[in-house]
C-alpha cells in the first residue's frame, strides 16, 4: 500500500533506515532528553538531592501541598497530551506515530517559552478514559496542553478537564490558532481601514480551529460572521448539525442571517479564513470585496494558493513558513503558558487569549504592510510580550494565584 512515507534502506553505519535524509537524521534518538539541574559530584550532594535529604522536602510538601510550587519542577512543566487522532494533516495515525510531533511541541515550549514539556501519547480514543488518565497525571504538571485530538471529542475533553483541574488546560489546535489568526487579522483590518463591527468574515472549516477562531473573533467585535463546512454555511435551519455546530450556528450565521454555500457566503465578504483544506475555486474568491483579506491556513496545501489570492486580496496569509505572514501557533502557546505559569494561574481565560493576540499585533507597530501583519516566530520580543500580556490579563480576570 502506498503511504506517501519513504521506506528507505537500512544503513549499517548509522543503524537507521533513512540515513542521509536530513529530516530523519535530525530525529535519530528523538528530539528530547532530561537534564539534571543539580550537580552530583560526591556523597554530600547525593545525600541532599536524594536520601536522606529529599525526605525533608517530601514531608514539607505532605504538610503543605503548595510547596510543590517551590521545590519541584511541577510549576514550570506542561504535559503535551494526544491520542493521535488528528495529527497535522495526516489525520488519525495513532499515538506511536504522533510522538515526533509531540516531541517537537515540547522543543518549541522550551525554546520559545522556557517551559519544560513532556510528550504523552495515550493509547485510547475514549473520551472518559482520556479525561480520567489526564486527571490522574495532573499532579505531576503545572498545565495541560491538548494536542491533535479530533473534533468534536476535543471540545468535550477540554471542557471537562477545565471543570476538574485547577491548572491551565489549553487545546492548542483551537486556541493557539485562534490567537495568532486574530492578531494577524487585527493588523490586516488596520491596514485596510476596516472596523471589526462592519467587517464581513467567512471561515471555512467547522472543526476545532474554526470553532475557536469564530469565538475569539466574536469576542474581538466581529458581528457579521459565517462558518462553513462541507455542506455550506452552518446555520440552525439545517437538520444535520451536531450539538457543537448548532451552538456555533447560534453564535454566527443565525445572528448575521447568512446561509447557502461557501460561494454564496464569499460574495462580498471582506475576510476569508481557511482552516479546512480543499481548494477554493478562483471564481468564488473573485466575488469577495475589494481589498479583501485571505488567510488560507491549511497545511501543506493552502485552500487558496498565495499567487492566486494576491490577484483579489490585499493581504494574504498562510500556515506555511515559505510565504509571508505565517499563521504559526508557536507565536502564541509558549508565551501563553509562560505567562500563566509566572502568576500560577488556575486557568487560561478568554481575556488572556485576547491579550496575547493584541500583544502580538502590537509588535508589528509602524512596520505594518501587506506582507508583514504578524511578527516572525524568531522575533526575540514575541515570548516576552505574550508572557507579560497574559500574566496581566490573568490578574485582571482573577485567576492568578500570585
Image (cartoon, rainbow, N blue to C red):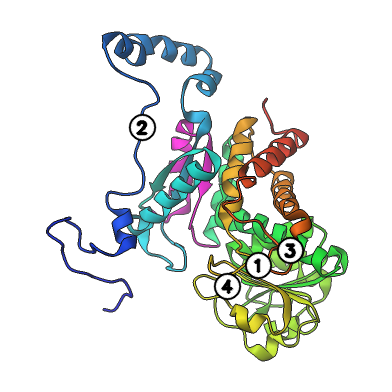
Report the residue marked by disc 2. 35
Magenta span covers which residues?
124-151
Q: Are marks 4 and 3 in contact (CB under 8 Å)?
A: no
Do we see residue 261 in this rendering?
no
Report the residue marked by disc 1. 245
Q: Earlier in the sequence, mark 1 or mark 3?
A: 3
Q: Are marks 1 and 4 in contact (CB under 8 Å)?
A: no
- Neighbor class of circle 2 (other Cα within 10 Å; few <14, some 14-19, many 20+) is few
- Neighbor class of circle 3 (other Cα within 10 Å; few <14, some 14-19, many 20+) is many
Q: Earlier in the sequence, mark 1 or mark 2?
A: 2
Q: Give me the C-alpha separation between circle 1 and circle 2.
A: 45 Å
Q: Secondary structure at mark 2?
A: loop
Report the residue marked by disc 3. 185
Point out the image quarter for the C terminus.
top right
Q: Percent from the top left, x then y, of residue 169?
A: 57, 43
Residue 231 horizontal side relative to residue 114, left or right? right
Question: Quick one: 108 or 284, which is closer to the camera?
Answer: 108
Question: Quick one: 313 or 59, which is closer to the camera?
Answer: 313
Q: Earlier in the sequence, mark 3 or mark 2?
A: 2
Q: Residue at left 55%, top 62%?
A: 152
Report the residue marked by disc 4. 276
Q: Are marks 3 and 2 in contact (CB under 8 Å)?
A: no
Q: Are marks 1 and 2 in contact (CB under 8 Å)?
A: no
Amino acid at each position: 500500500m502506498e503511504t506517501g512515507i519513504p521506506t528507505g534502506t537500512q544503513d549499517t553505519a548509522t543503524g537507521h533506515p533513512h540515513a542521509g535524509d536530513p529530516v530523519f537524521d535530525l530525529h535519530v534518538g528523538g528530539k528530547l532528553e532530561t537534564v539534571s539541574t543539580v550537580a552530583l559530584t560526591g556523597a554530600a550532594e547525593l545525600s541532599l538531592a536524594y536520601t536522606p535529604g529529599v525526605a525533608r522536602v517530601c514531608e514539607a510538601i505532605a504538610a503543605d501541598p503548595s510547596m510543590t510550587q517551590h521545590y519541584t519542577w511541577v510549576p514550570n512543566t506542561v504535559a503535551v497530551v494526544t491520542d493521535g487522532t488528528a495529527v497535522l494533516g495526516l489525520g488519525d495515525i495513532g499515538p506511536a506515530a504522533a510522538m515526533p510531533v509531540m516531541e517537537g511541541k515540547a522543543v518549541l515550549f522550551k525554546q520559545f517559552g522556557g517551559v519544560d514539556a513532556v510528550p504523552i501519547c495515550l493509547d485510547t480514543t475514549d473520551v472518559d478514559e482520556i479525561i480520567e488518565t489526564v486527571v490522574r497525571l495532573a499532579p505531576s504538571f503545572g498545565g495541560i496542553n491538548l494536542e491533535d485530538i479530533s473534533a468534536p471529542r476535543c471540545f468535550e475533553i477540554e471542557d471537562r478537564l477545565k471543570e476538574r483541574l485547577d491548572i491551565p488546560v489549553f487545546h492548542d489546535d483551537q486556541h493557539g490558532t485562534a490567537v495568532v489568526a486574530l492578531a494577524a487579522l487585527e493588523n490586516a483590518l488596520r491596514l485596510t481601514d476596516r472596523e471589526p463591527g462592519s467587517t464581513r468574515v467567512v471561515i471555512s472549516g467547522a472543526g476545532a480551529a474554526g470553532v475557536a477562531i469564530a469565538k475569539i473573533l466574536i469576542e474581538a467585535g466581529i458581528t457579521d460572521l459565517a462558518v462553513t463546512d462541507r455542506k455550506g454555511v452552518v446555520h440552525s435551519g439545517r437538520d444535520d448539525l451536531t450539538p457543537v455546530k448548532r451552538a456555533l450556528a447560534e453564535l454566527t450565521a443565525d445572528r448575521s442571517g447568512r446561509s447557502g454555500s461557501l460561494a454564496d457566503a464569499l460574495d462580498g465578504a471582506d475576510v476569508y479564513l481557511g482552516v479546512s483544506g480543499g481548494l477554493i475555486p478562483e471564481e468564488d474568491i473573485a466575488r469577495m470585496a475589494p481589498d479583501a483579506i485571505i488567510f488560507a491556513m491549511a497545511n501543506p496545501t493552502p485552500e487558496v494558493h498565495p499567487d492566486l489570492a494576491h490577484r483579489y486580496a490585499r493581504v494574504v496569509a498562510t500556515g506555511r513558513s515559505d510565504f509571508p505572514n505565517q499563521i504559526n501557533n508557536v507565536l502564541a502557546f509558549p508565551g501563553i503558558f509562560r505567562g500563566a505559569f509566572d502568576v500560577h494561574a488556575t486557568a487560561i481565560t478568554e481575556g488572556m487569549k485576547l491579550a496575547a493576540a493584541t500583544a502580538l499585533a502590537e509588535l508589528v507597530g509602524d512596520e505594518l504592510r501587506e506582507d508583514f501583519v504578524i511578527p516572525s516566530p524568531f522575533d526575540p520580543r514575541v515570548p516576552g510580550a505574550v508572557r507579560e500580556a497574559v500574566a496581566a490579563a490573568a490578574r485582571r480576570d482573577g485567576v492568578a494565584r500570585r
